[in-house]
Amino acid sequence: MKMKDYPSRNAHKNDESHESPGSPRHRKVLARWDPNEACRPDIDDAPVFYPTEEEFQDTLGYIASIRPKAEAYGICKIVPPPSWKPPCPLKEKEVWERSKFSTRIQHVDLLQNREPMRKKSQRKRKRRRQFNTRPRRRARSESSEANAAGENEEKFGFKSGSDFTLDEFERYAEEFKESYFRVKERTQESSAEIGQDSKWRPTINDIEGEYWRIIEQPTDEVEVYYGADLETGTLGSGFPKDSLIMEDEAKICKYVTSGWNLNNLPRLPGSVLGFEECNISGVVVPWLYIGMCFSSFCWHVEDHHLYSLNYHHWGDPKMWYGVPGNQASSLEQAMKKHLSDLFEEQPDLLNELVTQLSPSVLKSEGVPVYRVVQNSGEFVLTFPRAYHAGFNCGFNCAEAVNVAPVDWLQHGQNAVELYSTQLHKTSISHDKLLLAAAKEAVQALWEISALKKENPDNLRWKSFCGKDGMLTRAIKMRVDVEEKRIERLQGAARIQKMEKDFDENTERECISCFYDLHLSAACCNCSPDRYTCLKHANLVTCCDPENRQVLLRHTIDELKTLVEALEGSMFPQRAWVSNDHRGRLGQKNLSDSILAAHNKLFGADLSPPMKSEYVEDSTYKVSSADSDPEQRTNVCVELITLGSVVNGKLWSNKAAIFPLGYKSRVMFYNICNPLVKSRYTSEVMAGGLLGPLFKVTLEELPQVSFVHMSAEECWSSVCKRLNQEIQTQRSLGKEGLPPVQPPGSINGLEMFGFNTPSIIQAIEALDPHHKSAEYWGSKALSNKSSSSTGDSLAAEKNSLETRSAGGEIADSFEATTEETRSVFGRLLRKANREEMETLHRILCRGSTSSLWRVAIETLTEEIQRNSE
């Protein structure tokens, strides 16, 4: 599949405008360090981890192993084994001296202590004398950190600065640092005191104390450059990506393929970002950061609350501060309290990444903050929704990217729900990643159980499943949310299946809150390009209410089956695997080997042996019209789940076998709106002592269902309800309605799919030992009869058996009437009047009542308990 590239979060800037003559590059550094005014925070350090050579081989495995301890800090440092020394292509002369990168100007003294822009606009900031204009500059960046920068100063932000080569930036950064900390003077003083000529350098503590002094108690303007959010596709990555360009190919190869190479990390097996098809800059494609002393990254969380991993390629240390993810709200409240004017003017201030608040202030508010000093060759890992900030201690280069282990999924769900309330656009489709991960896991479970393929990838996915698996929990949480939202619609719109390619080529998001619409959407025919999420379905207004639609990629029943598959049930696994394979078959992308394995699992060849069609949702459907050459109908049944054969007389008859868990789909007139055809789901459920129960449900109104003891009775009830609606609408003058369906015109077995040849073949394969004796006996007689009397007699016999199939279950049950009277009589003599009246009300409500089904289930449980 051809990959499409999302635009970078910092669009490339042009070279048409001029840099201000007062930019940092063209002014002398007049601010000076005073060690007596240091404001170094008194906080604890985050944990540091030292993986062994063996542990370091599995990147995501190691991250998972340290998570129980490290996540409580929000941040940690990982020091690779001594052998880890990847070469940095950025140090090659061609890149170092000739490749330019853009920068932004940061006013460090204003990151915490500044007035709202509305006040500042009333008086201009006092500037020092400016000179030496530079001929060119870049236009303002559109990245998250630069969004706040406006030429009219409506928002505070980081304006674009000079372009540099790495060689030029190193010289500038060193000159700034030496001037600011008076390195030459200090060196002379030190030499005079101890009689040595070694060059004095400020310590990490010196720099940290001065940085927070500038933030908390600024006395001078301190402006620096920062080469932040630089696309590795432009300047290049600090990691080797192609061993062929390196001198020692064998030595470099391990770094090219390593999971710790940030170009590989996001899509490692086990990271759900591996299902993201687009190269999203800064999320899936790493960004570079070229820093100088005091250049800052302000308090923020990662997009979608993803993990992030940062590698320090070379240069002076980088100072980090982290807050645990479960304390994110506390940090936000503290910042709003201490910077209330700024947040009043700009409520989404934290999204702009332009504001610091001292760790000392946060600590005083009870917010835990932890420190990390990152040196060259070390990694820093941040956890989901862990706020982090920091600054650089001098010239350095780092690279960062996001990653999404399966445990991130619950955090990602919380993030998109939060974004919806904040009207915050998303960067990725969370639902798309979630469903893709679930399908991959179900495939792995099926291969383990059915094909005995216990390879590392399959076993990894298995570890996330089970009733309490983290992937299972994530899917459950999402299904619960979706189900509640569908229930709140209460029939306000027609529910339809979403087209498979609904968002394949166009991002779909809610017009109100920007919620991603991969799983569901609301719309109307009048405005085909306007969609909302289910929370804002009320915003879909239409001249004709019947034009309002809710599109579902999967029904709630299908999603619940997915949960069961992840929990370990083999039949739902088979349903999802076969459904996924059918979709691929419809797109001509299913490999012969997978199809063969699929057919082997079902014990029958499900490749189309007859007339077939590929319909709009790309699933393979067979036409039951081909089941009888003399009878051509428009019934087209889609198999959803085969189920499993159950021993017992009631679970089959002469016409069909009724597998427990069987489910199919068919189109028929909508009983609420006969002018259209809608999808109905037919299924076979357990009815305790009554044997199988047959249920038909209108998919767009799941609360409308028909439950009976035979397939014929179910569809007879559907027809009866349809005819009532047709007559009602005719009396109101409605035109274009279908004709009333005559009694017996709809074959229940046919509508369930039990007359469809390929489905019959698949069901028969579930019973290789012929335990459904009545069915197989009748089939043997039918075959013998067909060979002796011809096709006409066989057709007549089948027709008779089909018409009588609906009554077989009832007949077998009525044969025990006397025994039933005796048993119920003994039971009722032990009950009081109130209990008997309750039982009477339940029985009178019939099999469609939920109370009736509860009674059956309770009785069944008591029977099982007494038999133990």
Image (cartoon, helix red, strand yellow):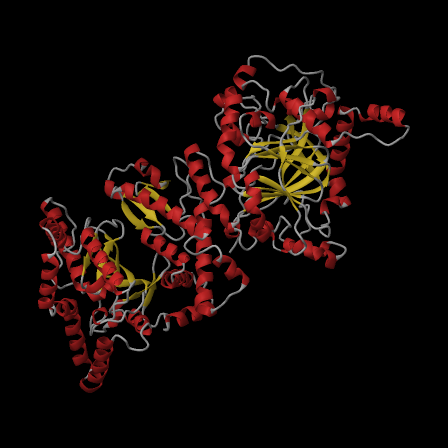
Q: Quadrant of residue 247?
A: bottom right
**Residue 684: percent from the left, percent from the top?**
25, 62
Numbered disc total = 0
- Side of 695 where 364 appears, left or right: right
> Would you say residue 592 is visible in this rendering?
no
Q: In the depicted view, which residue is nearer to us: 66 or 320?
A: 66
The image shows residue 70, relative to residue 256, as above or below, that is above
The image shows residue 104, relative to residue 588, as above or below, that is above
Q: What is the quadrant of the C terminus in the image?
A: bottom left
State the residue lying farthest toward the bottom: 788
**Residue 253: percent from the left, percent from the top?**
69, 57
- Side of 586 where 756 appears, left or right: left
**Residue 586: percent from the left, percent from the top?**
40, 62
> Would you say residue 481 is visible in this rendering?
yes
State the residue lying farthest toward the top: 123
Residue pictured at 70% horizontal, 44% vertical:
377
The image shows residue 391, relative to residue 748, as above or below, that is above
- Side of 324 where 566 appears, left or right: left
Q: Quadrant of residue 568?
A: bottom left
Residue pictured at 48% horizontal, 32% vertical:
329
Q: In the depicted view, which residue is nearer to us: 260 or 622?
A: 260
State the residue lying farthest toward the right: 195
- Side of 484 where 83 appears, left or right: right
**Residue 204: percent from the left, percent from the top?**
72, 32
Residue pictured at 31% horizontal, 67% vertical:
644
